[in-house]
Amino acid sequence: MESGEQLSLLRQIEDVQARPDLQLPAHDRFPHNHNRHTVKSVVFPDLLNSQRPLIISGYTSLSMVIEFLAECHQKLATDDNAFDTIQILIGNEPHPTQRTTFRLKDSNLVTEVQRYWLEERGISIFLCAKVIVAIELLRSGKVEARLSNQSRPLHAKIFRGDEAITLGSSNFSQSGLELQHEANSRYQREAEPERYQEACQIAESYWELGRDYQAELIELLELLLSVVTWQEALARACAELLEGDWAIRYTQGLQYSDEAALWPSQYQGIAHALWVIENVGSVLVADATGSGKTKTGANLIRSVMQKMWSTGRIKTEIPILLCPPSVEASWQEESRRCGENTLTCSHGLLSNTTEDKREDVLRLIRRAQVLAVDEAHRFLNLKSTRTRQLFNNIADHVLLFTATPINRGPLDLIAIVDLLGADNFDDDLLDTLSRIRRRRGEDIAQAELEKIQRAIQRFTVRRTKTMLNRMIEGNPEAFRNKHGVPCRYPKHVTDVYICDRNTATANQDRQLAAQIRETAAQLKGIQYVQKPIEVPDFYGGTHEQYLETRLSSAAALAMYYVMASLRSSRVRLIELIRGTEFAKTWGKISTRVKAQETGNVISCLQEKAGKPAQQTLDISMPEWLTDPKQHELASQEEIRLYERIEAVVTKCRMVEKRSKLKS
């Protein structure tokens, strides 16, 4: 699975509401809203690149007029001669607008205007900046406004520029310029001079029908400015933060046409994480599985480095990322795509490697200024060697990525605090943690847990599947992979098989589940002991103790996979035992479910039977680990146990294909 497809557990869905394949003429001659074309993409450049633009539209277009004047203001800020006069003729409209607040992006109003509106009038600059800009242009004389002054309503929609003019059905509004199906004609001065001049004649004639509306429009705009409550101001500030527009200069990178752009959820996640890092130093990104974490993480690392470069705080140019070996290539690819030279290291290098190689990795971790850890929940065991080694870092910023931050309980919270860096937390919390550690993590009070949770929330960026699906529903076109296919989480429908009913079928299934558990408990897990058993250098026990632990783990893992598969479905357990294709036939599944065959423990055991690994430990071992004949006998016994489980599971009388068997 390619990382450019967001490592997706997000399924590709059919676009049941796909736009019809309309056969429309050239967009530059007949501007329309279809597929990726909009009327606005043609009209706005025509008007913004003209000395005397003229807009004739209904009064419901006032919101878009204000948006347009804000862009004119930005252009005038760099070129006083960008416009001679901007003409606005407001005509009749059957449907009034309901929009009363406007916001300006990336524009710095003169200090005097800011002081006047913020201090003397008490207006919120976030809500009304574009209105302020429009008033400023009207008062400066750059904008001339007229209102239809005839008994016959003026319903024309004409947008005249110096080089082209557009007229037709589109109102100068978001609906007319971007959303609705519209029919417009556009005439260019050089290509169709006669039509251009005739259309301009109509526009200028209608302009003469209007009366002066300058003072009244200013008065109307001032009425749109209203003092907002602190709740509304706080809500808008939160939205500005979470929407992430403020962080665009840190998230902008090289974009190629054959690659999927960042999704809005990823932009917002990066912006939120940047704000958290700026305020508390480190961040825990705990978005749901399948949200495109690798792409988000790679771009977040790049954004953090960009921000450090911009503030002159950079000391170590290369950030360090620790990740599982299975996704190391994906992280490397995403890092290259976003233009960041991130050094990726496998988790395994902290444990299963030579002393020299491990020391090289530890040296990099200790010196890293930005340290990122993928699947951070694997480092929550405070007693493990690799977790303790991770605590030796002195990074300015630690970035943790995991979809499951809490796995085992309250002690995971303490481990997360340590990973994020104790110096990022206040003394009161550190005192609480110290008292808990002196009790060895026992008898943690509810008040102590809540205090730790509140502290960690300040470091956390978390969006659930429901939240992400809601974002997708709001803008489905923005959530497509690089092939243009829409993506979202599938609808999760659980179908539970009730085993606690006192019926003959339920009682029999409970007995069968108990038989499967009993049989699975006899498995040795031979398929999980195919390599020589080697004791790591850092292991503190004896070789005999390590061997016992290793064999116990293999047996426990074999039993776990059997029971976990059974809890999923009978088909899943059959797949574990016999393989994907066999399970599809057994379960009468005709659709494609996987790209590659998985499971088939029996085939693996048959292939390896009588071929034990060459063991090097000089200690007493079970004969099946060293003797080919005993290994073959043990493998055949293991196969018989799996066949017995297979025979039992076929007797279960569950009807539903997606049933869950609780055992």
Image (cartoon, helix red, strand yellow):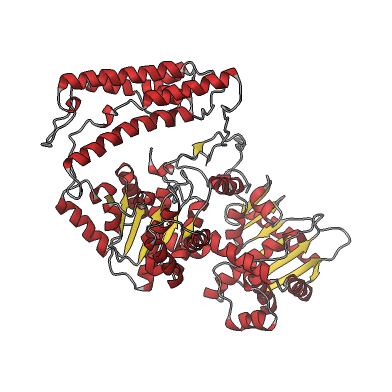
Residue 18 on image: x %, y %: 60, 37
Q: Nearer the viewer, residue 233 or 520?
A: 520
Q: Is residue 83 above or below residue 482?
A: below
Q: How many marks?
A: 0
Q: Residue at x 74, y 70 (%)?
A: 224
User: From the image, which quarter does the N terminus lie in?
Assistant: top left
Residue 200 on image: x %, y %: 69, 59
Q: Is residue 57 left or right of residue 119?
A: right
Q: Nearer the viewer, residue 48 or 549?
A: 549
When asked about the image quadrant of residue 253, the answer is bottom left
When asked about the image quadrant of residue 156, the answer is bottom right
Q: Nearer the viewer, residue 212 or 191?
A: 212
Visible residue check, residue 261: yes
Residue 130 on image: x %, y %: 64, 69
Q: Residue at x 55, y 21 (%)?
A: 507
Q: Nearer the viewer, residue 467 or 207?
A: 467
Visible residue check, residue 256: no
Residue 321 on image: x %, y %: 31, 54
Q: Is residue 456 above or below residue 118?
A: above
Q: Is residue 623 above or below residue 387?
A: above
